[in-house]
Image: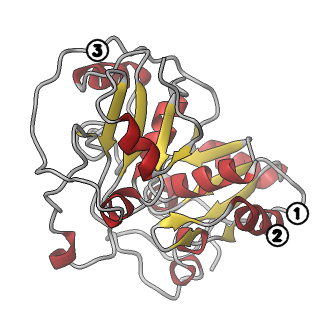
Amino acid sequence: MLKVPNIIVDSQWLKEHLGHDQLIILDATIPKVTVSKRIETKVNAAIPTSRFFDIKKEFSDTSADFPNTMVSPKDFEQKARRLGINQDSCVVIYDEHGIYSSPRAWWMFKSVGFDNVAILDGGLPYWKLNGFEVEKRKEMDYEKGNFHSKRRRDHFVSTQYVLNSITSKKNQILDARSHGRFVGESPEPRKGVKSGHIPSSKSLPYSTLMNGTKLKSKRDLKRIFDELNKDQKPMIFSCGTGITACVLALAANVAGYEENLVYDGSWTEWGSSNELPIEC
């Protein structure tokens, strides 16, 4: 059975295993919220054999009040099966920005009990930088897989959980948005969402964990998290809509932290409320 060697794999490892019958490559690209419409134009290039993991339309609850809400384990199972994913598949996920939205898909798989999943280090940019082949994105129907979900506790947490953690001081909350948004100096990109941050949270823009389109070294990541979480508490990660919070979750896992949680509603849910406390 093909197994990922780590939670992050490099382009050379993926190239060597292209064509393996258990390998499933997923493109989990979404547009960045803060970039212009011109830059948001979809890159019509894909790693050969990759399948599009549609975070926005398929793997989010589109009936929910807030964007990118995690689907139920049963819905995830059905949609994963439609992508041809099996219980013995080896899944590698990338996005065209480098490491931006792919960790969200990785965290989803982890939350439903699937561990044979990894992120492609540097994403599509590093794949292309290595001179490896790309192909035009294809829309295909796949033979239905036998993927099976099982809910794991404490991967995604609710507003009430975060509110309780502020009182109990059990967790360290880290916010992946830009520092300007965190302190209320930069406006929120979504209408009706207030500026500021969750009380007791600390700012950790996801970009500070990156070295170009790759994550920083394990040593550098550990130093960053140790500085912000001196008491070594379990961490809750938040962002705008639950996407880049998962970059923090990935980086924390690489750094050796295992008790990590993602606030699914993130700042869009918190900042839309008239009843929750806000600091600037």
Q: Residue at x 53, y 84 (%)?
A: 180
Q: Return the residue nearer the eye: 258 or 201.
A: 258
Q: Are marks 1 and 3 in contact (CB under 8 Å)?
A: no
In the rendered view, tell whether residue 202 sits above or below residue 160.
below
Amino acid found under the numbered disc labelled 1: Lys
Residue 196 in the image: state x and y as whole percent. 56, 75
Residue 256 in the image: state x and y as whole percent.
75, 48
**Which of the two labelled residues, at mark 1 and mark 3, occupies the earlier sequence position?**
3
Upstream in the sequence, badge 3 or badge 2?
3
Quarter holding residue 221: bottom right
Q: Is residue 201 left or right of residue 191?
A: right
- The residue depicted at 55 percent of the width and 70 percent of the height is 210
Q: Amino acid at mark 3?
A: Gly
Choose mark 3 or mark 2, whichever is in front.
3
For disc 2, the marked residue is 227
Q: Secondary structure at mark 3?
A: loop
Q: Is residue 36 left or right of residue 163?
A: left
The quarter of the rendered structure image containing the C terminus is bottom right
Which label lies toward us, 1 or 3? 3
Horizontal side of residue 232 vs 155, given as left or right: right
Mark 1 neighbour class, 10 Å CA radius: few under 14, some 14 to 19, many 20 or more:
few
At a point 51% along the width and 62% down the height, the residue shown is 239
Residue 73 is left or right of residue 171, and the answer is: left
In depth, the one of 44 and 274 nearer the eye is 44
Q: Are marks 3 and 2 in contact (CB under 8 Å)?
A: no
Instruction: List the residue tagged with mark 1.
Output: 230
| Disc 2 residue type (three-letter) | Glu
Location of residue 173 with respect to 211 vertically, above or below: above
Residue 137, percent from left and from top: 13, 48
Question: What secondary structure is marked by label 1?
Answer: loop
Instruction: Identify the residue position indicated by label 3 in the image.
Output: 145
Q: Residue 86's x, y, as percent?
A: 36, 16
